[in-house]
C-alpha cells in the first residue's frame, strides 16, 4: 500500500512538474514578445558590433518582424494548448470529471499569471537583458519551425489579400514627428539641455528655411567692378574686413566671379597695378527658393562657401555664405576681427541688459535671486524658460522676486537679450505681467 502511494505521489509530482514547465515555456514566448519590441536597438547594435553572438541574433530577429511575430505566436499557442490539455487530463485522472471546471479555472489563472502577465512584465522591464539570454534557444525554435512559419505566412497573406489588406513588408519607420516628440520628452526630463534641444530643432528646420531668410540682401552686398587694379581694390578695402569679394561687370545683375583676398595679398603688399581680372574665381549661383539644407549640399559638392542668390529672371537678390548657413543652426559666429559685445551691461544702479547666454550665477551672486533647489540649467535663458514653461515673446515682461524681466531680443526661439530691473517695492507673488 505504501509503495503504491509513493508511486502515485511520484506520478502526481512528475505530471505537475511537466505542466509547470509547459506553462513556463508559454511565459518564455510571452516575454520574447514584450522584450523584443521594447528593447533599445541602438544598444543591441553596439553589442553586435563588439562581436556578441547573442546580440547579432537579436538584431537579425528584430530585422525580420513578421517572421518574429509568427514564431513567438506559434510557440506561445502551442505551449498554451499543451498546458490546457495537460491540466484537463490531470484533473480528470486524479480528481474526476466533476472537477473539470475547477481545473479550467486553475489553468486560466496559471497561464494568465505565470504564462503571460509576469513574463511580459519581465520582458518589458529588462528587454535587452532578457532578449540576449533568450536569443539562442528562441533562434533554435525559429529554425525548427521554418516550414510551418512559411505556411502560416502564406496563408495569412492570402486571407489579408482577400480582405483587400496588405501585409506590411517592413516595420514602422521613425518619422520626423516621432523624433521631435522624443526630443521634447528628453528636454522635459532634463536629458537634453535647452541649448542642445534648440540646436537639434534648428537642424530639423534646415529643409524648411529658404536661403532668402538668412542671406545678405542685395542692398547690403559689397562687391567691386571688374577691371579695377589690385591697388584700387586695396584702397577700397582699407576700412573693411572682407576675405571674399564678388566681382560684377556693369551692374550687380551680372556677377562674373569672386576675388579671394588671399590670392592677391602679395600683390597688395608690393603695391602692384595689376588688374584683378586675372584672379577672379568662379562663383556659385543659387535660386532664391533653395533651402538652407540644399544650399549646404551644394556648397559641399562644389567645395565653395560663397554664392549669389538669384530670382527666376536671373536678377541678383542677395549673397549667401556657408557661415550664414551654419549660423541658422548654432547662432551667430563672430569673426576674429569682430568686437565682442559684453554679456552684461549695467545701464543704471537698478537696470542691467544681459545676454541670454550669461551664466545663471549672475542672478544669484549679483542680484540675490533665489533659485529652486532642483534647478537644472546653466544660463539666464534656461532660467526664464524654466520659469515660464514655454518660449517667451519679444518684449514680454514678468516679475520674479522683486525683479522685472523683459525679453528685449529674440532670435527664433533663442533668448538673446534680457533687461533686468530691480523694483523698489518687493513683489512676492512672482506672477507674470504682460
Image (tube, rainbow, N blue to C red):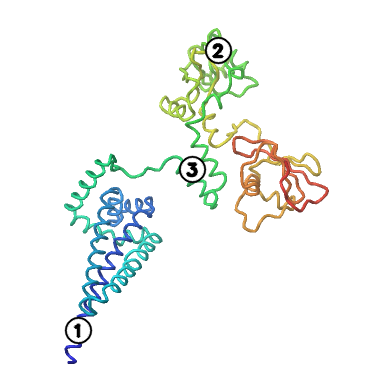
Dot 1 falls on a residue whose secondary structure is helix
Q: Which residue ends up furthest to the front in the rendered image?
A: 98
Q: Position of residue 433 (x, y in %)?
A: 73, 44
Measured from the top left, where is residue 78 in percent x and y?
23, 61
Above or below for 170 versus 411: below
> Does 350 sit above or below residue 239?
below
Q: Quadrant of the C terminus?
A: top right
Q: Earlier in the sequence, mark 3 or mark 2?
A: 3
The Cα–Cα distance between marks 3 and 1, rounded to whole angstroms, is 64 Å
Position of 213 compared to 287: left or right?
A: right
Residue matched to label 2: 252
Q: Examine the image and state in which quarter residue 353 appears.
A: top right
- Residue at 70% from the left image edge and 49% from the top image edge: 362
Residue lying furthest top in this view? 250
Q: Which residue is mark 1?
A: 8
The N terminus - image quarter = bottom left
Q: Which residue is mark 3?
A: 180
Viewer-nearest residue: 400 or 150: 150
Q: Position of residue 108 (x, y in %)?
A: 32, 68
Q: Earlier in the sequence, mark 3 or mark 1?
A: 1
- Front one among 21 and 210: 21
Which residue is located at x 31 percent, y 55 percent?
55
Amino acid at each position: 500500500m505504501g509503495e503504491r502511494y509513493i508511486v502515485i505521489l511520484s506520478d502526481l509530482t512528475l505530471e505537475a512538474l511537466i505542466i509547470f514547465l509547459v506553462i513556463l515555456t508559454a511565459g518564455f514566448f510571452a516575454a520574447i514578445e514584450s522584450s523584443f519590441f521594447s528593447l533599445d536597438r541602438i544598444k543591441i547594435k553596439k553589442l553586435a558590433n563588439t562581436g556578441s553572438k547573442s546580440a547579432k541574433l537579436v538584431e537579425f530577429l528584430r530585422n525580420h518582424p513578421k517572421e518574429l511575430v509568427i514564431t513567438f505566436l506559434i510557440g506561445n499557442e502551442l505551449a498554451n494548448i499543451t498546458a490546457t490539455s495537460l491540466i484537463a487530463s490531470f484533473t480528470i485522472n486524479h480528481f474526476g470529471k466533476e472537477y473539470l471546471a475547477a481545473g479550467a479555472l486553475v489553468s486560466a489563472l496559471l497561464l494568465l499569471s505565470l504564462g503571460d502577465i509576469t513574463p511580459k512584465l519581465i520582458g518589458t522591464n529588462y528587454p535587452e537583458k532578457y532578449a540576449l539570454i533568450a536569443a539562442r534557444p528562441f533562434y533554435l525554435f525559429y529554425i525548427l519551425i521554418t516550414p510551418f512559419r512559411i505556411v502560416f505566412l502564406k496563408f495569412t497573406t492570402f486571407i489579408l489579400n482577400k480582405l483587400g489588406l496588405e501585409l506590411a513588408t517592413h516595420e514602422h519607420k521613425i518619422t520626423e514627428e516621432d523624433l521631435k516628440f522624443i526630443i521634447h520628452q528628453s528636454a522635459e526630463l532634463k536629458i537634453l539641455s535647452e541649448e542642445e534641444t534648440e540646436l537639434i530643432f534648428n537642424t530639423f528646420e534646415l529643409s524648411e528655411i529658404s536661403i532668402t531668410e538668412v542671406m545678405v540682401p542685395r542692398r547690403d552686398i559689397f562687391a567691386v567692378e571688374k577691371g579695377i587694379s589690385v591697388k584700387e581694390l586695396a584702397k577700397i578695402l582699407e576700412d573693411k574686413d572682407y576675405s571674399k569679394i564678388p566681382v560684377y561687370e556693369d551692374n550687380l545683375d551680372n556677377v562674373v566671379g569672386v576675388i579671394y583676398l588671399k590670392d592677391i595679398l602679395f600683390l597688395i603688399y608690393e603695391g602692384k597695378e595689376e588688374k584683378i581680372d586675372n584672379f577672379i574665381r568662379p562663383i556659385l549661383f543659387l535660386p532664391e527658393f533653395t533651402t538652407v539644407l540644399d544650399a549646404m549640399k551644394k556648397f559641399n559638392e562644389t567645395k565653395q562657401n560663397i554664392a549669389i542668390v538669384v530670382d527666376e529672371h536671373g536678377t541678383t537678390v542677395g549673397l549667401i555664405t556657408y557661415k550664414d548657413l551654419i549660423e541658422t543652426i548654432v547662432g551667430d559666429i563672430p569673426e576674429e576681427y569682430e568686437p565682442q559685445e559684453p554679456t552684461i551691461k549695467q545701464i543704471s544702479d537698478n537696470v542691467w541688459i544681459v545676454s541670454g547666454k550669461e551664466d545663471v550665477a549672475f542672478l544669484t551672486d549679483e542680484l540675490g535671486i533665489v533659485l529652486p533647489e532642483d534647478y537644472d540649467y546653466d544660463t539666464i535663458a534656461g532660467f526664464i524658460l524654466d520659469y515660464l514653461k514655454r518660449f517667451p515673446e519679444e518684449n514680454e515682461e514678468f516679475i520674479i522676486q522683486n525683479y522685472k524681466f523683459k525679453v528685449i531680443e529674440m532670435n527664433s526661439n533663442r533668448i538673446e537679450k534680457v533687461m533686468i530691473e530691480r523694483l523698489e517695492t518687493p513683489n512676492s507673488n512672482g506672477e507674470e505681467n504682460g
